[in-house]
Amino acid sequence: MEKKKVAIPLVCHGHSRPVVDLFYSPVTPDGYFLISASKDTNPMLRNGETGDWIGTFQGHKGAVWSCCLDRNALRAASASADFSAKVWDALTGDELHSFEHKHIVRACAFSEDTHLLLTGGMEKTLRVYDMNRPDAAPRELDKSPGSVRTAAWLHSDQTILSSCTDMGGVRLWDVRTGKIVQTLETKASVTSAEVSQDGRFITTADGSSVKFWDANHFGLVKSYDMPCNVESASLEPKSGSKFVAGGEDLWVHAFDFFTGEEIACNKGHHGPVHCVRFAPGGESYASGSEDGTIRIWQLSPANADDEVANANGKTTAGVNEVTTKIEGFHIPKEGQTEG
């Protein structure tokens, strides 16, 4: 029987509570970065390629539900159960602004031009803050039909999409009028909504289904049933030929976009997977879990399997090169990844 190759992820420790959101910056002149949100109140910034810890943003007094970076990775934002959204200097870790809300904030997103910050949460209100005038009152869109779970920008900041905690569907808002112009219907609540790097697709996870929508005409392009309830899904950004999903079975699954066939199943987390996101180059993807760890998995090309493990299951040069880069991070020993 052919010995199945075991993927060895980079394991990033540091959070003391579940990791509930991950966000990769685009590639910048200094590389690309990964920010994580956790119930431990402290968002963390890492080198996106190696997983090396860069810094921790300290100041929230409640669980942090969402986090993001602007496109230059110069500022970070976080949304928290302490009824605030905060903006941080991503170079120094200093808090730049704190925007007070009247209830838990679940989602935040910088506009593509980096001038605006979008927030949403239990208040059922989407707010847009002007980063050039942070002391000015935010613009409020029409009332959301339910508590906001996810929020993102689309169409060069002309459209906002949001989903609700307590009902299905993704709502698309015209930023100019502040009104809902379209709803993408789903049976279950959408727990993850990602706009593809090229702006062509919206990837959603609802219940045990992952769906891909045309971001311009809003038609359903693909819908795949998953092996379990999944909380998050992400489309490979370069070719768009693969996607990953994670959820309650503790595993991170990779699939063929065109057929829905599972092409990899990564085991290692010891709790449900709350978030999966592809790196901007598509060569790897990160998963955040209830177990408090982030794992960064390589998306191996078909002919690179032997770089991960040889016939004896021993890790070879491909992984050893990586371990030299990430001294100080825990690499699971052989066999532990099956956990």
Image: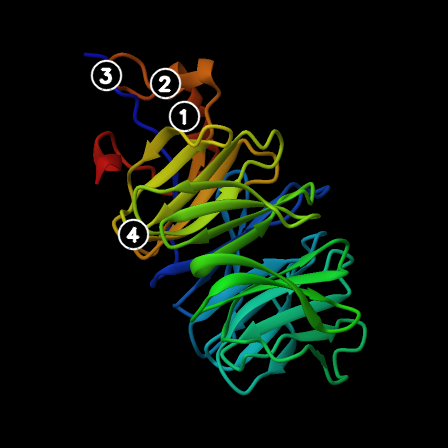
In 3D space, how far apart are the residues under numbered discs 4 and 1 (Cα atoms)?
28 Å
- Image disc number at residue 98: none
Mark 2 near mark 1, Cβ–Cβ under 8 Å?
yes
* Residue 325 x %, y %: 48, 34
Disc 4 versus disc 3: distance between alpha carbons? 27 Å
The answer to whether the residues at label 4 and label 3 have Cβ atoms under 8 Å apart is no
Instruction: Tell me the residue that label 3 is attached to.
Output: 3
Q: Secondary structure at mark 2?
A: loop
Is 274 drawn above or below residue 265 in the view shown? below
Pick whichever, 75 or 110, lies toward us.
Answer: 110
Residue 257 seen in render: yes
Residue at image position (77%, 73%) is: 177
The image shows residue 310, relative to residue 41, as above or below, that is above
From the viewer's perspective, tell me whether residue 54 is left or right of residue 218.
left
Q: Please, what is the three-letter code of the amino acid marked with disc 4?
A: Glu
Mark 2 and mark 3 lie on one chain; the one further toward the N terminus is 3
Residue 35 seen by the camera: no
Measuring 67% from the left and 42% from the top, which residue is drawn there?
200
Of the residues shown, which amino acid type is indicated by label 1?
A: Val
- Identify the amino acid type marked 2: Thr
Q: Which residue is mark 2?
A: 316
Residue 259, position as x, y percentages in the image: 46, 28
Give the distance between the C-alpha atoms of the residues marked 2 and 1, in whole angstroms: 6 Å
Q: CA–CA distance between discs 2 and 3?
A: 16 Å
**Residue identifier under label 4:** 248
Q: Residue 135 at x, y = what percent?
A: 75, 83
Can you identify the residue that label 1 sits on? Answer: 319
Question: In this orientation, which residue lies closer to the viewer: 305 or 256?
Answer: 256
* Among numbered discs 4 and 2, the one appearing first in the sequence: 4
Marks 4, 1: nearer the viewer: 4
